[in-house]
Image: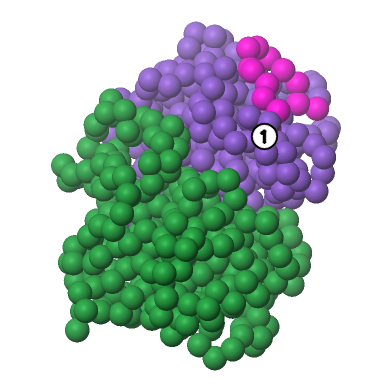
Chain colours: A green, B purple
Amino acid sequence: MEKLRVTFLGTATSIGIPVIGCDCSVCRSEDPRNKRLRSSIYVETDACCWVVDTGPDFRTQCLREDIRQVDAVLYTHSHMDHVVGFDDLRRFTFGHDIEMPIHATAETLDDLQRMFHYAFNGENRYTGYIKPNPHVIDGSFQLGDCEVTPLPVSHGKVETIGFQFQLPSGPRFGYVSDCKTLSEAAEETLREVDVLVIDALRFTPHPTHMNFDEALATAERLNARQTWFTHFSDEVDHQKAEATLPKGVALAYDGLKLEI
Amino acid sequence: MEKLRVTFLGTATSIGIPVIGCDCSVCRSEDPRNKRLRSSIYVETDACCWVVDTGPDFRTQCLREDIRQVDAVLYTHSHMDHVVGFDDLRRFTFGHDIEMPIHATAETLDDLQRMFHYAFNGENRYTGYIKPNPHVIDGSFQLGDCEVTPLPVSHGKVETIGFQFQLPSGPRFGYVSDCKTLSEAAEETLREVDVLVIDALRFTPHPTHMNFDEALATAERLNARQTWFTHFSDEVDHQKAEATLPKGVALAYDGLKLEI
């Protein structure tokens, strides 16, 4: 049976781990699972492959995982740690007379067009430049034979979405990297989800991200079969934090691969 | 005598070396000098320290060089490979109630304000966010006791500058990372310069960057005492390219440190 193959490109919050100039035990840790680039995943099916978010580490992440094909890009929201690697997408259209499909909400597309106007304004159509083809997300859509359902979530002032991915008659995979609370619609979609990846910034509360307690309560309420936490701050030491988690819940790390 | 201490944070053109998905001999080389992040330098004096440009690799570069202080940021121009690491500057004001001085031309500041409007619009004054203090470059200015002279150069459609740095009665250091030709004013300022860093993208010609021949002719015409090439494509193998250069001219590499 066809599966979704997921690679975690990054699992850190905005500043990355280690944090510049920080001497805390997590930032100085030798555990490779405590070295975290900005949050992003790469998803492959037999028909199509795509990346969710392109933060500043996007090139580094592509080199590390030897990613050579990206058929589409999905954005959760337009915070800097999720979008500023946009220009490095040019390598995936280089030499081909093709556009890169960019799927995002209208608000996020507006922000991308403001930030990267040279790419969207149609004036720089060189072979070597990224030529985006914007698709407004306003409901479920298909990537190859995978159904993608946007999940509206609350995350500070910026309209933010997560995604559910499902192959025909395959299990459901939910990815919500940045959120404080799920919307009712998101909760309904994700109920009994097979694999859930969810924002769990740290132990202490935060105004725009779930902490561990909130993420655990959400996973339990949704009755997710398997849950992976992501989008960590340097409060989170991988080994110590994982020891506190119940069965069926674990911490994602950069380079983790799942088959769903 | 006080010196300018210069660290090369990166020496690559926009896409970085290795290039994503490229199997050429330079991109697959084991020579660490062929591993290049996007072009930027860090300059320290006894009184002040600053960075020229903050590309996508800025956080990685700060971690590699253990940079813990940045008193000011200078921008050459607003192409993506020189600016999109802007948000990672937040670490250098974190916990301090200070603003980060941002020196750039009016055109570049306009672009920065468009791209990073959340930082410039005064609405997000959280401790943890970067709070820029824009300074329009319209002539020479001081950073500590260092005189900074902007050098207008031609580089495609975007107004671009290089910089000359000079401590009181010290030698002159010129940095021009992106240019096709120098302006008359830039040539006049840089004549007999002690150390010149100049764009030398590759051997073959390019519409907006100097190639090796053009950079060599410029260094010779200016009668620079010592010249370092930078901003390379993957045409440039460090060892092979350096063997072709005359005395007094060499290739910069990531991590190279100069005392001037």
Quarter of the rendering occupied by the C terminus of chain B: top right
Mark 1 = which residue?
B123
The foreground one among A137 and B154 is A137
Q: Quadrant of residue B242?
A: top left
What's the magenta region? B132-144
> Which residue is located at x 57 percent, y 17 percent?
B106
Quarter of the rendering occupied by the N terminus of chain B: top right
Relative to A31, is A100 on the left or the right? left
Look at the picture and state if A135 lies above or below B152.
Answer: below
Look at the picture and state if B139 lies above or below B125.
Answer: above
Relative to B196, is B153 on the left or the right? left
Residue A208 spot, x, y in % from top left: 63, 56
Relative to A146, is B102 on the left or the right? right
Callout 1 crowding tier (Cα within 10 Å): few <14, some 14–19, many ≥20? few
The foreground one among A49 and B8 is A49
Q: Quadrant of residue A70?
A: bottom left
The foreground one among B248 and B7 is B7
Residue A58 spot, x, y in % from top left: 43, 55
* Secondary structure mostly taken by the magenta-highlighted segment of the chain: strand
Relative to A257, is A1 on the left or the right? left
